[in-house]
Amino acid sequence: MNVLVCNAGSTSLKFKLYNMPEERILAEGKIECIGSFDNAIFHYFCSNRKEKVLLYKQDIATYSQGILLFLDYLLDKDFGVLKDITQIERIGFKTVLAKGYYGVHELTPEVLAAMEECIVIAPAHNKPYLEAINHFQMILPDVMLVGVFETAFHTTIPMERRLYGIPYEWYKEYGIQRFGYHGASHSYISSVISEKEGNTGKLISCHLGGSGSLCAIDNGISVDNSFGFSLQTGIIHANRIGDTDPYLFPFLLSQGKSMDEIMEGMDKRGGLFGLSGISNDLRDIELAAAQGDIRAKLTLDVYCHQILQYIGAYFIELGGLNHIVFTGGIGENSVLLRDAICNKLSHIGVELDEENEISQKGDRIISSAQSKVKVWVIPTNEELVVARETCSI
């Protein structure tokens, strides 16, 4: 079965075409800076060619244009892997949130309407997904479209860890609760540890990137996640503020700030960018901190502190710890951050191996043989999880 996986971001599109159940990648593509007209970047690679296609300064104003460009290359005489577009048998999307639909679902009109209802909660995610889904429906009307919702892996979280201290009627009427996100990534990490170790045991998965979350996993089951009702919550993100006091809103309004200004500050100008005043890219912040920038150093300290708070809470909830896994762009690549976090965990038996930390690539253990907790770095593969779920539904 040929399964196409679509991952839509606020200004990007990623595609992977799998042959399932062999899990063989036939082709993959990525489009950056959609909507910037002459500045979009298109990447394409297929299994039957060694060279990659890289096109700079493209005019890709909409997601629909980006989808058509990728599909054109799938059928290209030199770089194509399909004879006809109808050879795509299913399309899976790494969808985020739909009211009342929190697992893996065929994208029926009812599910799409439920996604529409949640745009106010996840505007940067649901809007582009709905545009992409709508376009695929027009191009391939007979192909099953599947949403693998980010909340799916977290439906096992106990209710006492889901509810806020709000009037219970708000939960019943509006469904306000902690949902948890990054489910595809944490699910993948859980499966890798299970394959390598026989079971996951008590595991904390740290997905750290442009957005970040931590997940407590007990024998393969998600039992807690740092995200809440929206993707704004948890640890600080690249631009989003993470956990905060809700009374900031009425206070800032009383100081003359408009709601639009407040939302922009919390969604676009907060997080790593807002604290550092330098960048939303941790590499830039680490470099500035090394050069003596005080705000950059403070930003790193805040980020590490918040991650450690969740690790401490999950250590207690799990009743012990067998594995810590770092994944995501920051988790996989920042030696400085991993060292700063793990050096604060020596009291629970965490000990790193400096040689493993620096020399190895791919899936690897970076803790010492004496460490009571195994510390891993595992590159995540969310698209593979989506392909598996899309194939199996």
Image: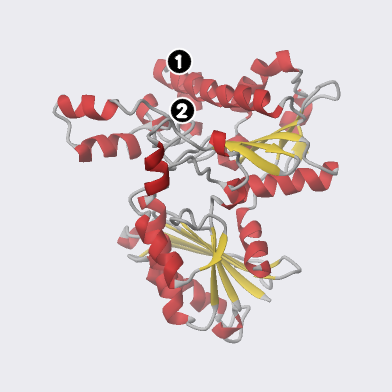
Instruction: Name the element at disc 2.
Output: helix
User: How far across and down, in percent of the image, does residue 200 sit?
Assistant: 77, 40
User: How far across and down, in percent of the image, does residue 75 sit?
Assistant: 55, 81
Under mark 2, the amino acid is: Ile
Determine whether, in the image, residue 142 is placed left or right of residue 325.
Answer: left
* Residue 356, picture quadrant: top right
Confirm whether residue 26 shows in the render: no
Q: In the rendered structure, which disc, 1 or 2, sits on the residue that comes first in sequence?
A: 2
Determine whether, in the image, residue 256 is placed left or right of residue 152.
Answer: left
Determine whether, in the image, residue 369 is placed left or right of residue 267.
Answer: right
Q: Which mark is residue 247?
A: none
Image quadrant holding the C terminus, namely bottom right
User: How far across and down, in percent of the image, does residue 344 sit?
Assistant: 64, 16
Near-viewer residue (62 or 249): 249
Decide: few, some or many residues near mark 2? Use Cα within 10 Å; few <14, some 14-19, many ≥20. many
From this view, report whether residue 342 is shown above or below residue 171: above
From this view, report whether residue 88 is shown above or below residue 208: below
According to the image, label 2 marks what residue? 285
Image quadrant holding the N terminus, namely bottom right
Confirm whether residue 200 shows in the render: yes
Q: Residue at x 68, y 18 (%)?
A: 345
Under mark 1, the amino acid is: Gly
According to the image, label 1 marks what residue? 292
